[in-house]
Image (spheres, helix red, strand yellow):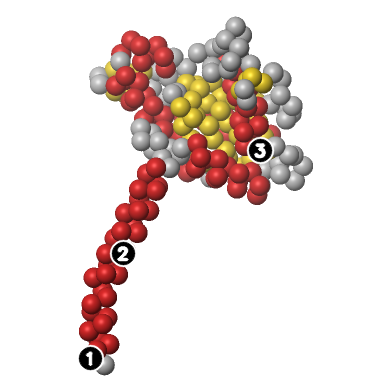
Amino acid sequence: MSHTLMALSAALPVAAGWTWHSRRLRRRIEAARRDPLTGLLTRDAFAEHAERMLSREPSAVYVIDLDRFKEINDSHGHAAGDAVLRATGQRLSRWAADNAATVVRLGGDEFAAVAPVFSREDLLWTLTELTGSLEEPVHADGHVFTVGASIGAVDYDPATDTADVSALLRLADEQMYRAKRGGAPWMNALSLTPERATVNGRRAGRRGAADRGTETVA
């Protein structure tokens, strides 16, 4: 018995060390899956969550592009721009918690989300709620910044539709572009058929597309 107790006592520090190491490793892995500025998921982590959500229940995919962000960033500096992005991340996180959604920062002032929706009325209500949240003023360094957003959405039902996350993001991006061009807060796709050509996997006219001669909207 004494030998057993001695062996266990010797093993306890080792076990504690491994537990601490595994916890630290998990924290590092989780941190790598988060955008350091906003705390939102990175693209790869988002894609994993989104695929699971879209396979289970009717959902909507959203692409969100902030309005007037470049103006704020250019006029007040990157610190002000970062404050706006952090505030946006916090608001999207709260919205995600209330709507069982998954949110990602795609880069710059662009974000995306997937959330369950069960009817057109549900989608419109969710878009209205999201728009209202993002239009709230941002207070930073003694300034008050008004930042709205252009939002594109597409709904998807795994029982009747077939599309992957990338295709749905591109469709939502089309609607975001339409909203921004038309001055509307949001637009939603009425079908899963793209309205514009694709250039290197991106909508023609989209920032980053190869054909720079097409129209772009900041």
Residue labelled with disc 3: 164
Q: Residue at x 35, y 11 (%)?
A: 74
Q: Is residue 147 visible?
A: yes
Residue labelled with disc 2: 18
Q: Please state which amino acid type lies under the numbered disc 2.
A: Trp
Q: Is residue 95 visible?
A: no
Q: Quadrant of the N terminus?
A: bottom left
Choose mark 3 or mark 1, whichever is in front.
Answer: 1
Label 1 crowd (10 A; few <14 / some 14-19 / many >=20): few
Choose mark 3 or mark 2, whichever is in front.
Answer: 2
Residue labelled with disc 1: 2
Question: In the current view of this chain or complex, which residue is farthest to the right?
Answer: 160
Percent position (x, y) of residue 125? 60, 33
Q: CA distance from mark 3 to mark 1?
A: 61 Å
Percent position (x, y) of residue 114? 57, 38
N-terminal label among 3 and 1? 1
Q: Residue at x 65, y 32 (%)?
A: 167
